[in-house]
């Protein structure tokens, strides 16, 4: 709606206990304020005889709040009369010309905040108003202090809003006639109990006045909280105990490193690392041993060698742990680093560092390695065997070509990856296994795949062809020279000696290392530039003699 000067007329006077208002002839009670109301009000100016009318009104009723006006107050008083006339009609008062007993904006969320914003209206609040109802309007912010200008009111209802902050209790002393107050269902701050606040609550001792207002403690909520505390706290304690137990005994890898048990893995940790021991992570499954590739929580790639046996005794489990403690202490460049172990009723596992390179079996069949690389690998393995024999003679290991890995760097170092715990303390058996590996490196044969009797049949086949048909024993893909044949024959002879279990012929591990080292030095010497030049000169001289 739009306000104009022409729409304003004088108000009639009312009784001594009433207030005089200007009415707006063009307005009706069904019209609502629009967004342009504030600008329209600011554009209005008092009529020429407005001041004289105000003076006459104050003579009739000196209690009117605008009676002590100054000329500069006239614009505000003029706007006050317009808003008062409209608000009186909006509040459904029966005769706004004669009286304005109540402000009733219950459930009027669109216009209630607008009327509250008219400070000039509350400043000159009509003295006839005895009731103000602003309930259920979703009013926000702090308590509207302008209401205290209406000091004569007897009832105030601000319930079902979202008013927050502190309630100005001391200001309520201004409202001497106030007998009904409803502040329920708001978000006020809780009042600290004092003599002043006790008097305030006694004055408005109504069960609905402060219900869910936030001003007083909600005993129902308190009982609910107490009940939840009595029931919930023990449940929380039990949950925390179970959770901490799970952390400590199932997934200690979630704990800070300082609280983790060093080298000890749990079934849950290994299960998480291998996606539940999935077939996708299974890399080896043979002889009752399953080997998985896994990724620990910190991102470390590991090789998990598992043994499933529920019938193992407590003594055997204890022995397993003691041997694993030894494996963790192994330190040699040709041994796969062991990170720890898992010992549970049905599961035992050794956790080692994952080596991404290929094993010797794959290397021999795919890469066609030269002779000098093969002998170098044998030397490194023999050195690792001597280290274990001297430092940890009780540790056994697997020397099958499928179990010896090669590092994935340019050094291609061989790495013993599988360690045994049963009947592997016999040094003669270790030398025998190394002898089989020697023969396999020369011939590139697979004892378990090619020969019906496995290793025994393989060794028998070598003995049958050595030394008369030695060329049949050497890998056909390997380049053969006079030096290579001689060195291969020495290696085969050493391998046959190692596989001879009689005490008279089988050499000791130290003798084996010494012999293979001599062969390796011979290989290095024969491949040196000086030796190659000398060999070329010898061939050239031999050809010259033949030409004569």
Image (tube, grey):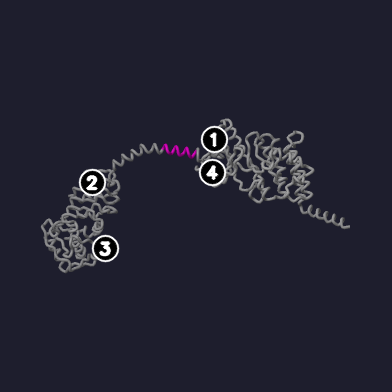
Mark toward the start of the polypeptide (1 vs 2): 2
Drawn side of residue 429 relative to residue 146, left or right: right
Report the disc number at residue 35.
3
- Whether residue 243 appears in magenta in the rendering, the answer is yes
Q: Considering the numbered disc 2 on the image, is that residue within a helix, a strand or a loop?
A: loop
Drawn side of residue 426 relative to residue 134, left or right: right
The residue singled out by tag 4 in the image is: 278
Q: Considering the numbered disc 3 on the image, is that residue within a helix, a strand or a loop?
A: loop
Quarter of the figure with the N terminus: bottom left
Q: Considering the numbered disc 1 on the image, is that residue within a helix, a strand or a loop?
A: loop
Q: Nearer the viewer, mark 2 or mark 3?
A: 3
Q: Considering the numbered disc 4 on the image, is that residue within a helix, a strand or a loop?
A: loop
Q: Nearer the viewer, mark 1 or mark 2?
A: 1
The residue singled out by tag 2 in the image is: 209
Marks 2 and 4, how far apart at CA: 66 Å
Q: Can you tell which quarter of the image residue 321 is in?
A: top right
The answer to whether residue 435 is seen in the rendering is: no
Drawn side of residue 309 relative to residue 93, left or right: right
Report the disc number at residue 346.
1
| Residue closest to the eye, 395 or 36 | 395
Q: Name the spot of residue 362 as percent of width and height, x first.
A: 65, 47
* Crowding near the residue tagged with mark 2, few <14, some 14–19, many ≥20 C-alpha atoms within 10 Å: some
Q: Name the spot of residue 127 as percent of width and height, x first.
A: 16, 56
Magenta part of the protein: which range?
237-248
């Amino acid at each position: 709606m739009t306000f104009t000067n022409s729409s304003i007329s004088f108000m009639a006077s009312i009784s001594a206990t009433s207030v005089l208002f200007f009415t707006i002839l063009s307005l009706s009670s069904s019209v609502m304020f629009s967004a342009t109301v504030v600008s329209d009000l600011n554009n209005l100016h008092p009529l020429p005889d407005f001041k004289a009318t105000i003076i006459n009104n104050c003579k009739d009723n000196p209690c009117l709040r605008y009676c002590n006006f100054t000329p500069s107050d006239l614009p505000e008083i003029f706007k006050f009369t317009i808003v008062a006339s409209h608000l009186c009609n909006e509040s459904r008062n029966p005769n706004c010309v004669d009286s304005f007993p109540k402000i009733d904006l219950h459930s009027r969320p669109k216009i209630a905040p607008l009327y509250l914003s008219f400070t000039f209206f509350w400043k000159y609040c009509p003295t006839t108003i005895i009731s103000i109802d602003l309930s259920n309007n979703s009013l926000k912010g702090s308590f509207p202090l302008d209401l205290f200008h209406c000091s004569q009111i007897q009832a105030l209802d601000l319930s079902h809003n979202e008013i927050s902050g502190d309630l100005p209790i001391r200001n309520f002393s201004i409202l001497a006639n106030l007998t009904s107050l409803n502040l329920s269902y708001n978000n006020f701050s809780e009042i600290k109990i004092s003599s002043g606040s006790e008097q305030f609550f006694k004055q408005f001792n109504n069960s609905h006045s402060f219900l869910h207002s936030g001003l007083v403690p909600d005993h129902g909520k308190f009982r609910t909280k107490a009940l939840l505390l009595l029931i919930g706290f023990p449940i929380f304690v039990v949950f925390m105990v179970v959770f901490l137990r799970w952390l400590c005994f199932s997934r200690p890898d979630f704990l800070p490193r300082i609280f983790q048990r060093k080298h000890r893995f749990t079934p849950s940790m290994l299960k998480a690392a291998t996606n539940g021991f999935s077939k996708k992570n299974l890399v080896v499954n043979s002889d009752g041993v399953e080997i998985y590739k896994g990724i620990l929580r910190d991102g470390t790639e590991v090789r998990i060698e598992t043994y499933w046996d529920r019938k193992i005794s407590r003594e055997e489990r204890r022995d397993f742990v003691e041997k694993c403690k030894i494996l963790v202490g192994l330190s040699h460049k040709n041994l796969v680093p062991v990170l720890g172990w898992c010992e549970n009723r049905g599961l035992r596992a050794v956790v080692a560092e994952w080596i991404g390179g290929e094993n010797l079996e794959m290397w021999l069949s795919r890469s066609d390695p030269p002779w000098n690389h093969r002998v170098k690998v044998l030397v490194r393995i023999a050195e690792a065997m001597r280290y274990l024999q001297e430092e940890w003679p009780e540790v056994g290991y697997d020397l099958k070509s499928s179990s010896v890995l090669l590092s994935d760097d340019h050094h291609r170092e061989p790495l013993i990856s599988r360690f045994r715990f049963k009947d592997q303390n016999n040094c003669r058996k270790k030398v025998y296994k190394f002898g089989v590996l020697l023969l396999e490196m020369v011939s590139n044969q697979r004892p378990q795949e090619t020969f019906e009797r496995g290793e025994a049949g393989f060794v028998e086949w070598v003995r049958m062809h050595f030394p008369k048909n030695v060329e049949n024993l050497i890998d056909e893909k390997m380049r053969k020279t006079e030096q290579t044949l001689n060195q291969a024959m020495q290696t085969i002879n050493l391998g046959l000696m190692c596989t001879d279990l009689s005490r008279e012929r089988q050499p000791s591990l130290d003798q084996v290392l010494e012999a293979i080292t001599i062969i390796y030095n011979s290989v290095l010497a024969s491949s040196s530039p000086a030796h190659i030049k000398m060999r070329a000169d010898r061939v050239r001289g031999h050809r010259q003699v033949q030409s004569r």
